[in-house]
Image (spheres, coloured by chain):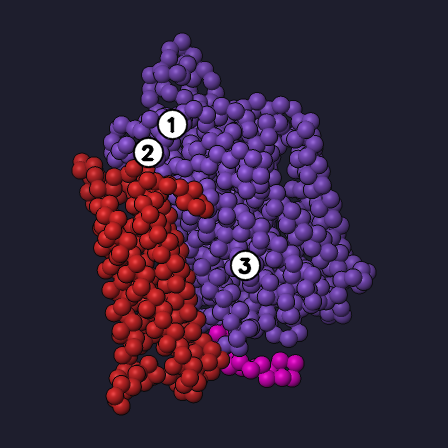
Amino acid sequence: MVDTGSRDTSAPEGMQGFVADWSAERRVFNVPWGKAMMWLFILSDIFIFACFLVGYMVLRMSTVEPWPDASEVFALTVGGQSIPLLLIAIMTFILISSSGTMALAVKYGYEKNRGMTTVLLLLTALLGTLFVGMQAFEWYILINDGVRPWGNPWGAAQFGAVFFLITGFHGTHVTIGVIFILIMAVKVMRGSLDSQRPGFLTGRKGRYEMVETLGLYWHFVDLVWVFIFAFFYLW
Amino acid sequence: MAEPGRESVSYAPAGEFDDMELSHPKTFLGKYIWSQDAKVIAIQYGITAMAIGVVALVLSILMRLQLGFPGTFALIDPGSYLQYVTMHGMIMVVYLLTALFLGGFGNYLIPLMCGARDMAFPYLNMLSYWFYLVAVLILVASFFVPGGASGAGWTLYPPQAISPGTPGIDGGILLMFISLMVFIAGFTMGGLNYIVTVLQARARGMTLMRMPLTIWGIFMATVMALLAFPALLVAVLMMLFDMLLGTSFFMPAMLTLGEQSGHEGGSPLLYQHLFWFFGHPEVYIVALPAFGIVSDILATHARKNIFGYRMMVWAIIIIAVLSFVVWAHHMFVSGMNPYFGFLFATTTLIIAVPTAIKVYNWVLTLWRGNIRMTVPMLFAIGFIFTFVNGGLSGLYLGNVTVDVPLADTYFVVGHFHMVMAVAPVLVVFGAIYHWYPKMTGRMLNDTLGKIHFWITFLGSYAIFYPMHFLGFAGVPRRYYAYGETGYIAESAQALNAFMSVAAIIVALTQLLFFFNLVWSYYRGRESGPNPWQATTLEWQTEHTPPRHGNFGETLPVVYRWAYDFSVPGAKQDYLPQNMPPEAVEYEDGGRGGGSAASPDEVRP
């Protein structure tokens, strides 16, 4: 098993360390392969979301119709008072919190604490599900207000199209993440990672680094949400 | 078991990685169909890609029949002509060349040349192939749906791609979108594998600056593909929404066939930017593996080290980076801001510098080499010619003022067929002649190979060279027929007929190649493990073809770069990468001595 904690302390730092890493004769990154692969996947996925967001900006800037005002559209009426961005603030809070529980799950995973890891993974999955549920609720409100992919009552038709596409694509990412976190929780609970039991499909040995690899994906999905939140809800 | 640190000098037993997990199937199905062995997956990729490539070849012949002899063939109507154009382009660029270079040669060569047992994630690798196969089948299915395949042109520009009047808007374009998305998903799985394997699973002693250029080319192309395909995925997804849900990402308000389209405010230009952000790197995704492979073929068959190895590597990296900032040179006439044109023309022409470095280095590799005119060598030299020709016409098209009159003429068709169709395909052939002995243990027939080369090489000049003249004469591309077009000289038709005949001859010659592949598999001369006396690791395997796990009991240890040919003083004119310094025999009877620690030190 790879011990990611023990790094050769004599390895040069900074730029020289970078060069030493890349010109060394063996692995460039001193991490398990699964983790390196997840980094690369995230890099590729960043380009997908970047293309979505850039496309959104181009459409928003080139449209001649007014763009609906986010603070009015995404306001929630509580006790007769309209509070802008209330729902989305709660959703963001929940998703960011789930990153915290995920990070704790990784920590307990490396400590081989099966109980805590399972609980925290399940909590993360629960928070993720809550997020997706609230997103569905938000879609429900907007659809009730008359927002459609091809038009809306307030202005540029692209508003609905971009909204459903980007939040939908992100919501799909969250949903897939939740499914994998549940699978991982089951694996941790029955001890597959301790006994290095091969996976059902891939046949790869179970190891606790897998929790961290999955965590990377989850943090990435959260981070993307921050960008979507900033560009779509705050702009 | 502790994995060695980066700077550590102790190694795990036999250089094995704990992360490498091979599956050991027992059944025929597990070994050859649902195989997780990169070598089998490579051959699956190769056969599928060549099969779909033949479809695209037939489509091109149908186009040539119409252009050479307009109106003679009743089955070709304007609609189906456009479908042939579209499917030919898309298949050749994405489903043949990308899949064959990265899925085919990448899978076969990366683990073997890096000295790994297999790809990093064998299961994902297998899934990658099956996704690719499904993508191909969906694409082929689009020929058989009502309305037939899409006729939008391979660039699939909106609004016409999904507007009434374009062939295939009933189902063909839908299947095209789905097929592309499946392809991208599958490719991502494979691509992650290739990169992780190159970065993490190299054999002991194989530093990045000792890797064969083939691996460098495939590696950088894969990195580019992982960053470029997302743009295509997004573009395709948005257009799918425009088509199915009535959104207006790309669709402006317009009248089509007298009807309101129902869309408003979309930006067709946005699609073009997204598409070419994918499309231009795609050119180099196809070209970089070809660059790498051709470097190795030239060095091996000229018995000389590649000239300027470090510069070759850096040129590959610089080309890869630059190719992400040149995309809008495909859009000079699209109506984008003209200031962009200046910017992108500049970046485009800067790419000529690293590319020229590569061409000079190839020529200097040949200079005073002990050239063996084998079939792979012929194809490699042919590549240099076609690539230089295609590259020079690229200088015309890269400049805005010259491009504007030449845009959408046959000059463009001639240019990109020379530089990214014929040139990489010549490398594909060269690579197959070069590595076929390793894959099967038998040589391909030499005489058939030489006939194949000369007809293909000269034939493709006969087909594509005249296109440049047609372009200067102003003949537009993608036209079904020209009819009574006043400004096009009548002799253009004669030239078209000539090109069509040449195309048919070249296409038929490929049958010879396929026959050679099959015949040599059974009757070819036994090749032995290293028929070309090459230095790279794949030729040093215990068995030919290499068995499951590639290298037998122990993994090779690498002591030198990949180009130790004709080392001064050494008895043998090539030193395999895994030959220890003390095993080298010298002409003065000495042994061992000079250690080949870095490429700089082994340079003669």
Q: Is residue B493 visible?
A: no
Cα separation between marks 2 and 3: 37 Å
Are dots 2 and 3 on a single chain? no
Badge 2 local density, few (<14 within 10 Å), some, or many (20+)? many
Do dots 1 and 2 share one subunit?
A: no
The reply, left or right, for residue A93 in relation to residue B407 is left
Does residue B279 lie above or below B316 as drawn?
Answer: below
Q: Colour of chain B?
A: purple
2 and 3 marks in contact (CB < 8 Å): no
Please report contact status of discs 1 and 2: CB closer than 8 Å, yes or no. yes
Question: Which chain is indicated by disc 1?
Answer: B
Q: Is residue B550 magenta?
A: no
Q: Amino acid at mark 3?
A: Leu
Give me the residue at 56% from left, 82% from top. Answer: B262
**Kind of residue at disc 2:** Glu
Q: N-terminal of the two: label 3 or label 1?
A: 3
Instruction: Give the residue pinned by disc 2.
Output: A25
At 62% from the left and 23% from the top, the residue drawn is B526
Please tell me whether mark 2 or mark 3 is closer to you in this view: 3
Q: Which residue is mark 1?
A: B558
Tell whether B97 sits left or right of B223. Answer: right
Q: Which chain is red in the picture?
A: A
Q: Main secondary structure of the magenta part?
A: loop
Which mark's residue is nearer the viewer, 3 or 1?
Answer: 3
